[in-house]
Image (cartoon, rainbow, N blue to C red):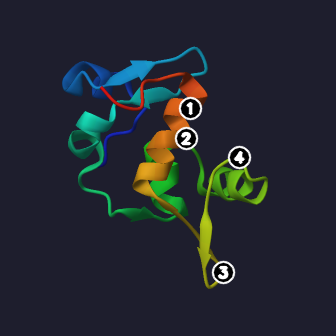
Amino acid sequence: MPSQINAPTATKQAGAAKQSNDGMSAINFNTQDNLLSHYRDVLDTKDVAEILGLKVATVRQMFREEQLPYFRVNKQYRIPKVRLIQHINEQTGGNNHE
C-alpha cells in the first residue's frame, strides 16, 4: 500500500515530511523519490486520492474547483507528481528546495 503524505508513519520513517496545522504535510524535493517513488511521474485522481488520504470524488471536486493544478487527457484529470508536491509545499509553507 502506498505511503500517504500525511500519514504519521511517513513522517517518522522518511523524515521528509513536515506536518502542518491543516493535516497536510510538506515534502522536500530532495526526498520526494523516497516517499512517492512507486508512483508514475503523472498522477491520476486515484493516485492523488491515495497520496492525500482523500476520496476520489473529493479529488475530482478539487480539480473542478481548480484547487489543484491539472491538465486533461480525454475526460480524465492528470497532474504531474512534481506539481502536486509543489502545490502541497505552497499550501503548507514548506521549503521547495533544500
Q: Is residue 72 left or right of residue 47?
A: right
Foreground: disc 1 or disc 3:
1
Which numbered disc flags the more N-terminal residue, 4 or 3?
Answer: 4
Foreground: disc 2 or disc 3:
2
Q: Is residue 31 above or below residue 48?
A: above
On the image, which quarter does residue 3 sit in?
top left
Q: Residue furthest bottom?
A: 74
Which numbered disc flags the more N-terminal residue, 2 or 3?
Answer: 3
Q: CB atoms at circles 4 and 3 under 8 Å apart?
A: no
Looking at the picture, which amino acid does disc 2 mark?
Answer: His
Measuring 25% from the left and 19% from the top, which residue is drawn there?
A: 12
The residue tagged 1 is 90
- Can residue 53 be seen here? The reply is no
Q: Regarding mark 2 in the picture, which secondary structure is present there? A: helix
Q: CA distance from mark 1 to mark 4?
A: 12 Å
Looking at the picture, which amino acid does disc 1 mark?
Answer: Glu
Q: CB atoms at circles 2 and 3 under 8 Å apart?
A: no
Measuring 67% from the left and 57% from the top, which residue is drawn there?
A: 57
Q: CA distance from mark 2 to mark 4?
A: 9 Å
Looking at the picture, which amino acid does disc 3 mark?
Answer: Lys
